[in-house]
Image (cartoon, rainbow, N blue to C red):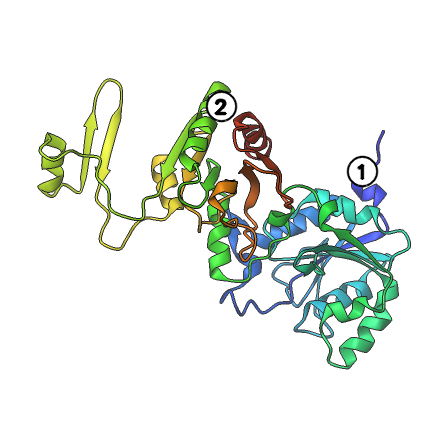
């Protein structure tokens, strides 16, 4: 019988970093809710699944419980101070730190980091944007060096790494979807995007420059999903005003007369025209919550600035850079459909491979 994670990792203490001031967010990040659950509970649940001992680094008695004490930082005001608190208090040789504002921590990354402990003082993920020091492992060997640095008023964790035996989990070793997991919520905008991403039903946005073939791909994806038995919604965003009525028709006349909501029903279908107040287009989250109940998945076209998981369509002939890679790095991009091979950090599938793209969608959102 296989050992449980708590048995395998008995020499590791889980440490929840909760000493931040949430200045950019403007309110307590630890208590922000996603689907009715405080953020800190998500990270705490991950730690408690893996490690027999868990503590909170930071003066947060409101988050503590009998089996999870909260300890004030001796050096408050920095992540390095919180890591120091965890190391100093832990009875084990290792600690695994997780911030309280990480909404989607991934067990696969935890496992990968734990496997890299032999011969190291610290084990840290590293992406194209640099180290991820607050979702990482630290050994007691780090403690004296941390104290020396903190006593000098130097709070940058990366400075410490030059003095340690550091094992790194690089981008190519990270599991698919790592961008989503290694996301912290620091601003109200990031919090709003996280709320949108957690919508039910799940949402996938098809994005691209104009003329690339978004609608054609969307048609193929809908056909393939329907063939597999899924209930599919489709939403297209139009930056301009549009009309589905023809001038002179009864429905058009009723709308022109001032009806705020006008519906047409028949035995086969129902259509609705609902007037938005000037300058008050509802958010995508509101639209889906109002009109998309009972669906398994919603595919959208044109919502390139929303924080939904995205598939980008790319054609070599267009000669345009990718929207979600390059100058902009959208962490919600999880696949590209292209007519040429591309070296990217997400899967790149042939533009016509609707079956392969739907396999990815199903595995991530519908399995």
What SS does tag 1 mark?
loop
Residue 334 image position (x, y, % from top left): 57, 42
Residue furthest to the bottom in view is 152
Residue closest to the eye, 360 or 111: 360
Quadrant of res 302: top left
Is 103 situated left or right of 94 in this image?
left
Asked which secondary structure carries label 2, the reply is helix
Q: Nearer the viewer, residue 178 or 347?
A: 347
Q: Are marks 1 and 2 in contact (CB under 8 Å)?
A: no
Instruction: Give the residue drawn at x 44%, y 40%.
Output: 212
- On residue 327, the disc is none
Give the residue pinned by disc 2. 224
Which of the 4 quarters of the picture holds residue 94?
bottom right
Q: Is residue 70 above or below residue 326?
A: below
Rendering coords of residue 51 (x, y %): 78, 48
As drawn, which residue projects farthest toward the right?
A: 119
From this viewpoint, is residue 356 visible?
yes
> Does residue 342 appear to the left or right of 48 in the view shown?
left
Residue at 72 percent across and 61 percent down: it is 133
Inter-mark Cα distance, 1 to 2 = 40 Å
Locate the N terminus and report the quarter of the image it occupies: top right
Q: Is residue 84 above or below residue 350?
A: below
Identify the mark nearer the N-term, 1 or 2.
1
Query: Which residue is at 75% across, 56% downward?
Result: 136
Q: Do we see residue 314 in this rendering?
A: no
Give neighbour class at mark 1: few <14, some 14-19, many 20+ (Cα, 10 Å).
few
Along the viewing direction, whichever of 88 and 143 lies nearer the viewer: 143
Residue matched to label 1: 4
User: In which quadrant of the rendered image does the C terminus lie?
Assistant: top right
């Amino acid at each position: 019988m296989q050992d449980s994670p708590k048995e395998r990792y008995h020499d590791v203490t889980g440490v929840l970093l909760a000493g931040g001031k949430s200045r950019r967010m403007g309110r307590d990040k630890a208590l922000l809710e996603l689907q009715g659950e405080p953020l800190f509970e998500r990270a705490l649940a991950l730690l408690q699944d893996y490690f027999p001992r868990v503590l909170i680094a930071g003066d947060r008695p409101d988050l503590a419980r009998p089996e999870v004490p909260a300890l004030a930082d001796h050096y408050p005001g920095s992540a390095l101070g919180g890591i120091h608190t965890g190391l100093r208090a832990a009875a084990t040789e290792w600690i695994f730190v997780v911030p309280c504002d990480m909404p989607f921590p991934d067990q696969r990354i935890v496992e990968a980091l734990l496997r890299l402990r032999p011969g190291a003082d610290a084990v840290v993920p590293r992406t194209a944007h640099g180290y991820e020091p607050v979702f990482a492992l630290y050994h007691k060997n780090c403690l004296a060096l941390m104290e020396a640095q903190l006593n000098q008023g130097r709070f940058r964790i990366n400075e410490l790494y030059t003095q340690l035996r550091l094992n790194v989990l690089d981008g190519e070793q990270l599991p698919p979807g790592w961008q989503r997991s290694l996301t912290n919520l620091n601003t109200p905008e990031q919090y709003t995007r996280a709320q949108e991403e957690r919508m039910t039903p799940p949402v996938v946005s098809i994005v691209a420059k104009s003329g690339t073939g978004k609608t054609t791909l969307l048609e193929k994806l809908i056909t393939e999903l329907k063939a597999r038995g899924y209930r599919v919604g489709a939403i297209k965003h139009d930056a301009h005003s549009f009309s589905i009525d023809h001038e002179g028709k009864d429905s058009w006349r009723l709308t022109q007369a001032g009806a705020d909501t006008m519906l047409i029903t028949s035995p086969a279908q129902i259509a609705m025209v609902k007037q938005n107040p000037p300058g008050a287009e509802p958010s995508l989250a509101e639209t889906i919550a109002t009109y998309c109940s009972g669906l398994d998945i919603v595919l959208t076209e044109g919502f390139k600035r929303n924080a939904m998981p995205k598939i980008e369509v790319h054609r070599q002939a267009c000669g345009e850079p990718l929207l979600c890679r390059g100058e902009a790095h959208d962490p919600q991009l999880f696949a590209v459909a292209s007519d040429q091979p591309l070296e990217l950090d997400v899967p790149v599938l042939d533009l016509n491979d609707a079956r392969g793209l739907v396999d990815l969608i199903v595995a991530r959102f519908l399995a």
